[in-house]
Amino acid sequence: MSRLLVTGASGYLGQELCRQAAPDFAVFAAYRNNASSIAAGEALSLDVRDERAVRAAMRALRPDAVIHAAADNSQRSRAWGTNLEGSWNVARAAMECGARLLHVSSDMVHDGCAAPYADDAVARPLSLYGRSKAAAELAVRAAHPGALVVRTSLLYGLDGLDRGTASFVQRLQRGERLRLFVDSIRQPLPRAELARALLELLPRRLDGFLNLAGSEALSRADFGLAMLRWWDVPFSPEEVERVRAAQVSAETPLDLRLRLDRAQAVLGRELPGVTAVLRAGKTSR
Ligand SMILES: NC(=O)c1ccc[n+]([C@@H]2O[C@H](COP(=O)([O-])OP(=O)(O)OC[C@H]3O[C@@H](n4cnc5c(N)ncnc54)[C@H](OP(=O)(O)O)[C@@H]3O)[C@@H](O)[C@H]2O)c1
């Protein structure tokens, strides 16, 4: 049985990755703080910023493959430590022990001015998070030339509230209005679909950059409202303000549509869009 190390295993994507991988791989599920969030596999505490600890873990575990999903998704300067240094540490250690590496990156490496973005489009990030993820991509590719860098979009799921929808619900409960961006375009993807695709890509000799996102592009506003309706969250039109992103922040990239032809060719299928996922989810619940 192949040995798979998942970093960020306690996170939103990592939990699903470990669940799906567990029947077919010996899974090592690395977390930083939240051991109780590990869904499957052998849990291990590992701070990816700690170079010696990462090397020691890699030598001890001898993984055949690593999916690096650990990240600091904050817009704080501390994100650099995990996203850049941590990714460098993981990539170098994976390279040293001959492990295949899939690195999870983000559409936020783009500035939103030149969509649709090719898989290997040069990153021009606007936000701190985007800059740290873009720098991480370069570090990973330098440390591990065989690595595959996967750029994905907003992640969600129907097995529980995703982070974005949960924060909308909390705001509504506090009596706050929601300010939803009408001009920020993304291609949300269920985490289960991304996890499945990443596991399919593990045995493939594919390197470089790959966009993996849902086939439907829609605004953050339309996505947010569709999710609230799907979850039957009560809200009135007065509680929702549709705004332009620039009214709130100059660091929000607008059009982050990704070209998905390489993903379709490699996977042999289109990754589903929001409308199709929600429709299928409605009939099955
Ligand atoms: N969620 C999205 O919509 C989205 C969109 C595009 C791209 N992505 C990318 O997808 C990947 C997974 O995102 P996610 O939403 O699953 O993240 P998440 O839910 O915020 O989880 C982050 C994970 O990283 C771990 N982590 C943070 N700092 C660490 C450190 N210094 N050392 C080791 N582990 C550390 C956390 O561990 P503890 O919780 O145990 O501390 C947690 O397991 C990330 O690369 C992210 O950039 C996500």
Image (spheres, helix red, strand yellow):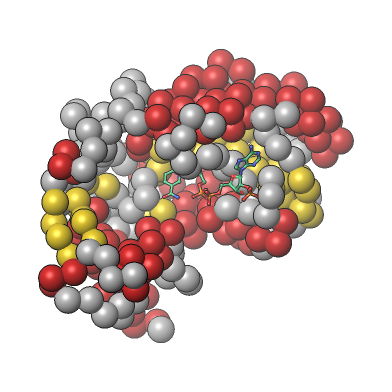
Q: Return the residue nearer the eye: 257 or 236.
A: 236
Q: Quadrant of residue 246?
A: top left
Find residue 90 and report its horizontal and vertical position in percent: 66, 29
Q: Return the residue nearer the eye: 53 or 180.
A: 180
Find residue 229 and report its horizontal and vertical position in percent: 26, 75
Q: Is residue 98 visible?
A: no
Q: Which quadrant holds the C terminus?
A: bottom left
The residue at the far front in this view is: 175
Q: How many marks can you see?
A: 0
Q: Residue at x 58, y 53 (%)?
A: 11
The residue at the far right in this view is: 60
Above or below for 92 versus 196: above
Find residue 3 and report its horizontal and vertical position in percent: 76, 45
Q: Residue at x 49, y 29 (%)?
A: 77
Above or below for 185 versus 172: above
Q: Return the residue nearer the eye: 163 or 209.
A: 163
Q: Residue at x 64, y 51 (%)?
A: 9
Q: Is residue 182 visible?
A: yes
Ligand 1: give its quadrant: top right
The residue at the far top in this view is: 142
Above or below for 233 versus 72: below
Q: Return the residue nearer the eye: 19 or 261.
A: 19
Left/right of residue 194 with respect to residue 98 in the rendered view: left
Q: Residue at x 35, y 37 (%)?
A: 107
Left/right of residue 30 with respect to residue 104 in the rendered view: right
Left/right of residue 206 with respect to residue 277 in the rendered view: right
Q: Quadrant of residue 205?
A: top right
Find residue 140 and report its horizontal and vertical position in percent: 56, 23
